[in-house]
Image (tube, grey):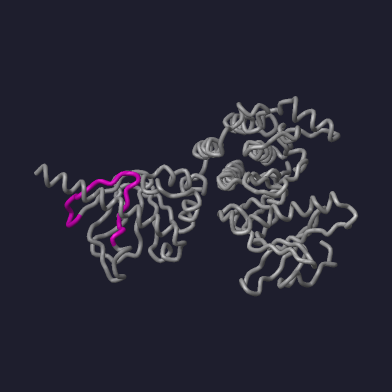
Amino acid sequence: MRDDFPKKIGKYPVLRELGRGATSSVYLASDPFGNREVAVKLFARTDASDARMTRRFRNMYLNEATLAGKLSHPYIATIFDAVDDDDASYIVMEYVPGGTLEYYANVARLLPVEQVVEIVFKCAQALWFAQQRGVIHRDIKPANILGGADSTFKVSDFGSALSMTADQTQINGIGSPAYMSPEQVRDEPLTHQTDIYSLGVVLYQLLTGKLPFNGGSHASLVYQILNLDPVPPSDAREGLSHDLDDIAMRAMAKDRTRRYSSWQEFADDLSRVIGRLALPQSDLNDAAKFASIRALTFFHEFEDVEIWEALRVTRWRRTVPSTVLIREGEQGDSFFILADGEVRVSRGGTTLNILKPGDCFGEMLYFSAPVARRSTSITAIAPSLVIEIKAASLNAASDALQVKVNRAFLRILLERLTLANARLAAA
């Protein structure tokens, strides 16, 4: 990287350059007020005589600036601040260390298949969240998916985004040609399905290390995108399942009526493939956890972003029959949700109830003083998958997540009271 970078951008001291492109340069900087490292994207100032380029850069800046604080999702790089003054135009973003997915879009550095599917699943969830807020990215490619040090990947660079609700003039003819949908190449009106197509290309490239179309010229590339079908990924990489072929080819279908019509359809198919991949029993990745949580009654009223947050405060545990999860008389600071299997509730050795997937237990201590003790024992009676949430972790979570958890507890309490009253009436 070059070392001729500004020493300070606005109030942010610059530490080093992270990257440079035609429209902007990105720097690692220090946020003295937030006490954190941030990435600052400084937009290039063009010659005032070039009105077209000036207008283009200005619109790209405005696109991204208007999203500050609006796309808060675990798998979207957060925009903290936007400044446009006489000295400079820049965006202050979350710094995500670890480079981009571009590094892994290479035959020599391919990621494990299950990790590729999980990353694309997370991107689909992030872009679905953006679509629900009227935003189409329009430039999805490996270089715009940042890789975190903890293997978390985040969608970034919304400078080309199309806002379905914005008043400002949108920029046409943008995007990266190899990842453009046929309708984007033809400069037609776009929907979220153009991002689905582009993410399908990313999936294909991460699985095979190759682009589905790679013409020797721009004209050749455009012809292929509009007229040819790519070879299935399994033809380019040994051992890939035909399920992955079907997903990639459907995401990249030229006819929008044959392409995935929604992000949820795309994510559901990815989730099903993850469930069939050969993962160790102890290895529950985020995509599998997300699919499991979303299917549980306890989480029916949770938004996707709240489910993703819940994943960060949970501990998952597989158990064998006869495992004691809670022992009567012990102190505890956790409550549990049964994701799979069956457990027995007992007191003094007498069975009180059998709990099924979606049921919770141990939650009373969440509402009690720290010195409270367990009133029942909980024992697995089948191979089970248990989600544990510590009260302290939940108390440190967002207000939105706490409200949803409390409402779920209230619903369960009402259901239990209704059932108890029915039993009393029938006695």
Q: Position of residue 419 (x, y in %)?
A: 20, 46
- Residue found at x 71% / y 71%: 12
User: Bounds of the magenta span?
Assistant: 347-364
Quadrant of the drawing holding the C terminus: top left
Up-down relation of residue 335 to residue 222 (above or below): below
For residue 354: magenta?
A: yes
Up-down relation of residue 368 to residue 211 (above or below): below
Which image quadrant for residue 229?
A: top right
For residue 43: magenta?
A: no
User: As rendered, which of 207 and 229 lies closer to the eye?
Assistant: 229
Up-down relation of residue 130 to residue 326 (above or below): above
* Side of 154 where 291 appears, left or right: left
Whether residue 253 is visible to the viewer of this picture, yes or no, is yes
User: As rendered, which of 207 and 221 lies closer to the eye?
Assistant: 221
Considering every residue shown, the one lying at the far left of the view is 427
Q: Position of residue 226 (x, y in %)?
A: 75, 28
Whether residue 277 is visible to the viewer of this picture, yes or no, is no
